[in-house]
Image (tube, rainbow, N blue to C red):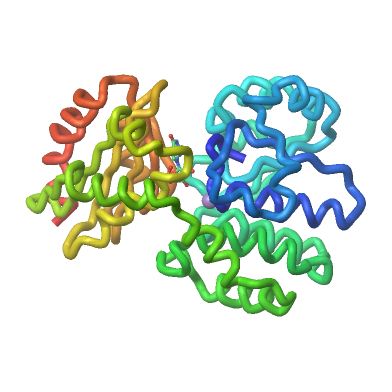
Amino acid sequence: MHQKPDGDAMGSALGIYHYLKALNHKVTVISPTNWADFLNWMPSVEETINFESHKEKSLAVLANAEIIICLDFNIFHRTKHLAQHLANSNAIKVLIDHHEQPDTASFQFGISDTAKSSTCEMVYDFIVASGGKEKIDATIATCLYTGVITDTGSFRFPSTKASVHLMVADLKSTGFDHSMVHSQIYDQSLENRLRFIGFALLNRMEVLYEYNAALMYISQADLNKYNIKTGDTEGLVNYLLSIKGIRFGAIVIDRTEERKWSFRSKGSFDVNLFARMHFEGGGHANAAGGRSSDSLDKTIQQFKQIIPLYKNQLQ
Ligand code: 5GP
Ligand code: MN
């Protein structure tokens, strides 16, 4: 899975883990980095190895792997320091992903489909297509459902096709508790996180009405003041798109090693293209990310200089 895995990355990995275990395969899930606390309830998440904190263990697993299934990313550099080890591995690499611009040459087999709501939906398709539908139990359903709701904004985004609802109907027939999943993901904030969101909306948001865009920026001091951890900033960018008329939301967070951008859009404005063009990033047409090694002030200035170029597209 990609670094700082989200619900879809962790859900697809654990979903396929439980499925392959049911077929008596020996399976290990490796995350390139740590992950958000709000994923820590997931079935067998405690078995997942964090490469950054357990490097030798991870490398031993990689060295013995016959097959490496790469989920929710399509180019090795999305796995940060794991990338060089994936590139050097002789194992068969299988791609299952829904992002734009797959680096297909790096994988021997795979499915890349940008029309899919989530990698979890693709794992479901894979299980069904390989004749394993009856193996989908409440545990697998719980994992796959997690990625579907996090990647579709709980069924809001246009990627939510009829196939998604049909799949969920099928998952639900396993008896898994979908309310529990929503509650675990969305209703476990600590007070400091809500105070932080209030602070950010009040003091760190600029609405650029001229461009139907909104910008938010978070400094390291802000993160420290509110004791903000991995995952606590998830979803913040969506507030920008909830403003009437706003079609493009951008947030930049000053992580120690880089300034990390998240871009979201509604309609035809292609943030994957925007992220690739200006901020060394990528993703999907309506949800993408990027980075900058400039200071926070500088990258904000850069954004403000670029945005007038898109005035027509944003109107
Ligand atoms: P987020 O803003 O939630 O971090 O990411 C939005 C989407 O863009 C996710 O599907 C994520 O995997 C992808 N993404 C985020 N950052 C990058 C990046 O730097 N490069 C690429 N290619 N995709 C990214
Ligand atoms: Mn995904």
Q: Residue at x 78, y 35 (%)?
A: 92
- Give the answer, above or below, for where 170 lies relative to 59: below
Look at the image and tell me whether residue 257 can be seen. Answer: yes
The residue at the far front in this view is 191
* Camera-nearest residue between 219 and 273: 219
Residue 108 in sight from this viewpoint: no
Residue visible at 69% across and 66% down in the picture: 141
Residue occupying the far left of the picture = 210
Q: Where, quadrant-wise, is the C terminus in this rendering?
A: bottom left
Q: Quadrant of the N terminus?
A: top right
When the figure is inspected, residue 260 is found, relative to residue 188, above or below; the finding is above
- x and y percent of residue 52 in the render? 62, 25
Task: Identify the residue at horizontal 26%, vertical 62% (top origin).
Answer: 242
- 262 or 282: nearer the eye? 262
Instruction: Specify whether 163 is left or right of 173.
Output: left
Q: Is 167 rendered above or below residue 270?
A: below
* Residue 200 appears left or right of 61: left
Where is residue 93 shown, x and y percent of the image?
73, 36
Q: Position of residue 192 (x, y in %)?
A: 37, 46
Q: In the rendered picture of this protein, how many numbered marks are placed on residues?
A: 0
Give the residue at x 53% y 76%.
162
Would residue 65 appear left or right of 285 to someone viewing this image?
A: right
Please state the horizontal and vertical placement of residue 20, each as a whole percent of the image.
83, 52
Name which quarter of the figure residue 225 lies in. Answer: top left
Q: Who is closer to the viewer here, 55 or 286?
A: 55
